Image (cartoon, rainbow, N blue to C red):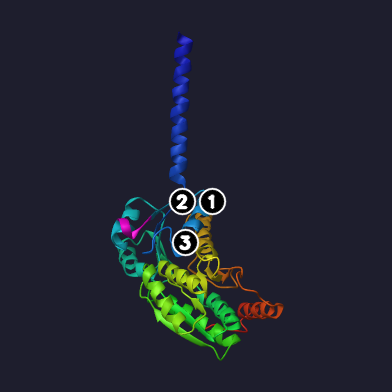
Amino acid sequence: MKRWTIYLLMLCVVAITGCSHHQAAAESKIKIGIMLSESGLGDQSFNDSAFYGLEKARDELGILFDYKELADTGDYKTGFEELIAQGYDLIIGHGPLAEEDLRIVAEEYPEQQFAIVDSNIDLPNVLNINFKEQEASFLAGALAGMKTNTDIVGFIGGETSPVTQQLFSGFRQGVAATNPEAEVLERSAGTSSDEDLGAKLAFELVVEGADYIFPPAGTTGKGVIQRAQESGGYTFGLNSDQFYLGEETVVSSAMKKIDVALFSIAKDLVDNGELTIDELELGLKENGVGLAPIRVIAMTKTEEERLNELKNNIINESILVNE
């Protein structure tokens, strides 16, 4: 009987110390929280790319992460405050619309580490993550300029922001590089979450003769892609390879590799216990942006070589793409 009592006591000790060990291990892991932009998780673009980057960091670096959505919090500030209360080591604001609220909470919590994507906040506890997305949109524009049959191409922006302007500037410059005679028609949706509006604006451009349309507009862009597919036109995806949204119309995607950026800052945090990166700006040279594989349309060898030449000229800075 005495032996059984001792044995049971030993099992209890092992169970208790084992639980304590696992709890301590969980508590020692880096925790990252992100406040997603208005289109939310499942947008197959901006937010999903961020999620994939943190998911990879979880699987390969052992971090813990969670996210908040506007549909649940009502505003960005509430989401940030909830993440702060939950003790996250790093809190990320995803997109320029989060800038104002992130600035407020970053000033209120100077010891908390923050990061923001596609924006700039001049505070010591905020890491700004930006991309030279105009370099990717330049290549999309160059491709559209090469392949248009009407010499008319279109651009439909989502949220009005410096990023949207960068994308338009690069796209227009790329079109001019391969087809100086082509006209670039522009429309602004003013939102990244209205599929029906995207379809309406796409129809307007198709009627005006645009056969290639670049819609950096989140969920609004999905409407553009669907309308273009119905009308026999061509489009480009954004942020991730969006070929699956329109397998007869999406010729490529101007990829902004948010997943690469978030994985790199997670690694910095895991390796050093704090962020040692002051600013992060990724372009073609840093593998932070680029074109997805070209599908749907046929490319000649000369066209492929020209597109590759333009890409290399951007990397070696023979071509400077305007913001």
Q: Main secondary structure of the magenta part?
A: helix
Q: On the picture, is 309 further left or further right than 198?
A: right
| 97 to 92, vertically: above or below | below
Q: Amino acid at mark 2?
A: Ile
Numbered disc 2: secondary structure: loop
**Quarter occupied by residue 317:** bottom right
Amino acid type of the residue that numbered disc 3 sits on in the rendered structure: Gln
* Residue 162 in view: no
Q: Secondary structure at mark 1?
A: helix
> Magenta span covers which residues?
68-72
Residue at label 1? 61
Residue lying farthest to the top in this orientation: 1
The answer for how far apart the CA atoms under marks 1 and 2 are is 9 Å
**Residue 292 coordinates in the image, percent (x, y):** 58, 68
Please state which of residues 202 and 192 is positioned toward the viewer in this rendering.
202
The residue to which callout 3 is attached is 44
User: Which residue appears at 50% of the width and 67% of the height?
Assistant: 239
Q: Which residue is mark 2?
A: 30
Which of the two residues, 117 or 237, is positioned nearer the viewer here? 237
Distance from disc 3 to disc 1, alpha carbons, whole Å, reads 24 Å
Nearest to the eye among marks 3 and 1: give it.
3
Quick one: label 2, few (<14), some, or many (20+) residues within 10 Å? many
